[in-house]
Structure formats: C-alpha cells, structure tokens
Amino acid sequence: MVPCYFKPSLLLQLIICVGCHNVGVAMATPNGLVVPNIKKVQSLSILEITKELSRLQQMASNNKLNSEDITGGTITISNIGAIGGKFGSPLLNLPEVAIIAIGRIQKLPRFDDDETVYPASVTNVTIGADHRVVDGATVARFCNEWKLLVEKPELLLLHMR
Ligand SMILES: *[C@@H]1O[C@H](CO)[C@@H](O)[C@H](O)[C@H]1NC(C)=O
C-alpha cells in the first residue's frame, strides 16, 4: 500500500502520498494510549526498528514523547493481543488512512494436507482503511502478502535491504 495521510484542512480533504513508511505503534501507558511512529521503516534493519521501538516505549512510559514522534505516521499497528484482545474493529488514527489490529496468538488445532491434526499458532488480524484512498482489494492483497511473510519469515529476509 502506498503510504498516505490526509492533510487536515477545513474545506478540502487533500491526500498526501509520502515516500516513506512511518509506522505508528499504539502503546498503552499509565497516562493513556499514545501512538508514536517509527520513521522510514523501509530503510531500517530489524535491529534499528527494535532500538527505535524501545526508545519510543521508554519516552511514552515517561510521558516524554515529542511532537515529531507522534506526527507524520502513515499506518498504525495496534497489538490488542498484548492486553488479551482476540479481535478488534480498529478505527483510523487520523490523518492516517489505514490501521491494523493484531489479536493475541492462540494455539489451536489445525489439519495438515494428510488431514492429521497439529497445533498451530493462530491470530486474528483486522485492517481498517479509508476506501477513498485504498480499496478493499488492495487491503486484501496487502493482508495476504503480510500473512505469507509472517508465516515464512525467510521470505522477509529476501526483501530486506
Ligand atoms: C478471532 O476472532 C473471532 C471472532 O471474534 C473469535 O471467535 C476467535 O476466537 C478469534 N481467534 C483467535 C485465534 O483469537
């Protein structure tokens, strides 16, 4: 999905498409829920993302996030599973145009190709998107691609820079 957000304006809704993925992460803190974002995720390594995530978590729990940290996001990920949620209907974190809610992972029985039962780690992923910008087919393709990468992380390595 092309990273975009709405430019806040009183009369016109302008859509701004940006060249970078700034991924917001919803964080529950003692002061309430905050959504700082990790800038330019597409050019960071997993270690760099982890480092930035820890910095943001630290800042959030100390109520020290600055305006740069909480603006400019293009999509939000909300890990509702971390607080026990199974399924959500995420509402857009405006002016962003998409949000993803990930439920908790549960071990559930599944069948393999030979119809043998095996334990599988299963989670619900719900994506909310503003259809003035991204249509349902784009969201479904994105979700399938993402599912494939989560199930086969070795494919993710092939895409990394
Ligand atoms: C996924 O969501 C459905 C509908 O709320 C729920 O019944 C199911 O238990 C959830 N599955 C998991 C793995 O959380």
Image (cartoon, helix red, strand yellow):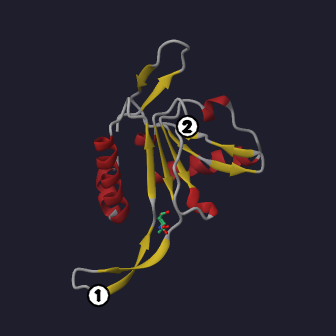
Q: Where residue 116 sits in the image (x, y, percent)? A: 29, 87
State the image quarter where residue 20 is shown.
top left
At horizontal 45% and vertical 53% (from top left) the residue drawn is 126
Image label count: 2
Looking at the rendered structure, the secondary structure element under dot 1 is loop
Q: Which residue is mark 2?
A: 93
Residue at x 46% of width, y 53% of height: 46
Q: Is the CB of the residue bearing disc 2 within 8 angstroms of ligand 1?
A: no
Residue at the limit of the structure toward the bottom, as seen here: 116
In the rendered view, does 10 fall on the left or right side of 107? right
- The amino acid marked with disc number 1 is Thr
Q: Is residue 92 above or below residue 18?
A: below
Disc number placed over residue 161 in the picture, else none: none
Asked if residue 113 lies left or right of residue 125, the reply is left
Q: Residue sitting at 40 percent across and 33 percent down?
A: 3
Provide the residue designation for mark 1: 116
User: Under 8 Å from ligand 1: the CB of mark 1?
Assistant: no
Of residues 67 and 135, the one drawn nearer to the viewer in this rendering: 135
Disc 2 on helix, strand or loop?
loop
Task: Residue 153: name its quadrant.
Answer: bottom left
Sort mark 1 into few (<14), some (14-19) or many (20+) by Cα contacts within 10 Å: few
What amino acid type is highlighted by mark number 2? Asn
Specify whether 30 is left or right of 27.
right
Rendered location of residue 111, percent (x, y): 30, 81
Give the percent coordinates (x, y) of residue 64: 74, 39
| Mark toward the start of the polypeptide (1 vs 2) | 2
